[in-house]
Image (cartoon, rainbow, N blue to C red):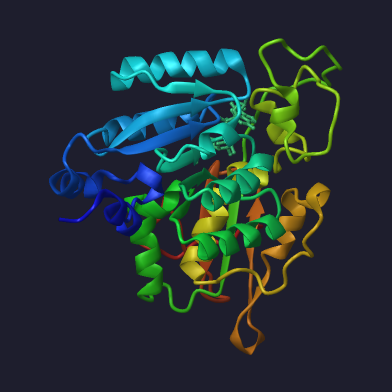
Amino acid sequence: MVTRREFLDALAVGAAGLAVGNTAESYARIVGANDRLNFAVIGLNGRGYAHLSSLKANRSAARISHVCDADGNILKKFADAVQREMGEAPKAEKDFRAILELKDVDAITIATPDHWHAPMAIAGLQAGKHVYVEKPCSHNPAEGAMLVEAQQKYGKLAQMGNQQRSSPHSMEIVEKIHGGIIGRAYLAKAWYSNVRKSIGTGKEAPVPAQLDWDLWQGPAPRRAYRDNVHPYNWHWFRNYGTGETLNNGTHEVDVCRWALGVDYPKVGHPGNDRDGGCGSRWLRSLRSKRKQDERVQSRQHHFIRRPAGSRFYDGPALRELHRGNPEGREAERSGF
Ligand SMILES: NC(=O)c1ccc[n+]([C@@H]2O[C@H](COP(=O)([O-])OP(=O)(O)OC[C@H]3O[C@@H](n4cnc5c(N)ncnc54)[C@H](O)[C@@H]3O)[C@@H](O)[C@H]2O)c1
């Protein structure tokens, strides 16, 4: 008989439960349907609901035992949704550190603002939890490297959530590129464009009673609360977010790196530049060197014909492959 702990440690939890469906049946068979993985979902306003629906889809293998948000209103609303959707009330907690101390929590999922991703994920691994963290996995490259080291050191499963890796369409295209459909792909370009409403300039305001602003800021430099930052609009402030580049652009750049088979950038940015971790610098650091000095670049551009995508090039006689063109037909050259 495989014990629960042995099973958990060996389990390819995949997205810390978000892809646990493949294993749910075998898990239930081995340890019994009542012995499910306990998940704590942390950061509950927007993306947290995707975590809820994924865990709900896998509820024979997983339960949401704890929920956590620095905002009491958001916390209560999500706890109610869990009770409604999963049929069990989770314990609600504002401070994630209290959750990490609990031995019966097996895995945490993180959907907080970006500046919390790596520190919280590392703390989770250190506490012996499996970790699913939303993209981008870190606020700057140095933190990303620390997260990889922590995963190796503590031996728990860690996964970043950028869904293209699980998209049949992207998988098909990348497989074709690896199979040589456009020759030797040497360059990829990615873009994402969006028209968003203005968030205004905002103004300093009293911290709302339900929000623990100190906990929300966490590892970021201390700033007075402003009324146009939380929730969601923190994306556009570099102390917390990474701009559109690593918000949505990260999905497209990831497909480029995957298809080209390039690893972590060799020419990276020096580490301790939390304030410089924003999009453009990280993007510049994505320039990688390949054997014989061939340059492989992943870049993000505004590209007006489609709102988002990735293109791959095989030489001066341009052919391209992208999600709208899986057959890799001849492409017209554009300014892009
Ligand atoms: N993979 C995807 O396709 C996808 C889609 C949407 C969002 N995301 C990612 O999910 C993350 C969350 O995005 P969102 O739109 O839900 O943001 P949001 O601002 O709506 O929600 C974040 C929540 O985290 C909470 N929070 C902040 N600090 C916390 C702390 N220390 N402990 C607990 N909770 C804390 C906030 O109070 C807020 O409720 C982002 O990093 C984003 O990039 C990924």
Asked if residue 198 shows in the view, the reply is no
Number of numbered markers: 0
Q: Say above or below: 228 vs 310.
A: above
Taking the view exactly as shown, the residue that stands out farthest to the bottom is 292
Q: Quadrant of ligand 1?
A: top right
Could you say which is closer to the camera, residue 29 or residue 217?
A: 29
Q: Say above or below: 88 vs 186.
A: above
* Residue lying at 42% horizontally and 13% vertically, measured from the top left: 80
* Residue lying at 66% horizontally and 12% vertically, measured from the top left: 210
Q: Position of residue 64 (x, y in %)?
A: 37, 30
Q: Say above or below: 55 vs 308.
A: above
Could you say which is closer to the camera, residue 19 or residue 292?
A: 19
Q: Position of residue 99 (x, y in %)?
A: 52, 34
Asked if residue 12 shows in the view, the reply is yes
* Residue lying at 34% horizontally and 34% vertically, measured from the top left: 55
Q: Position of residue 304 (x, y in %)?
A: 61, 43
Could you say which is closer to the camera, residue 181 or residue 239?
A: 239
Left or right: residue 214 compared with residue 50: right
Could you say which is closer to the camera, residue 128 or residue 69?
A: 128
Q: Position of residue 87 (x, y in %)?
A: 28, 18
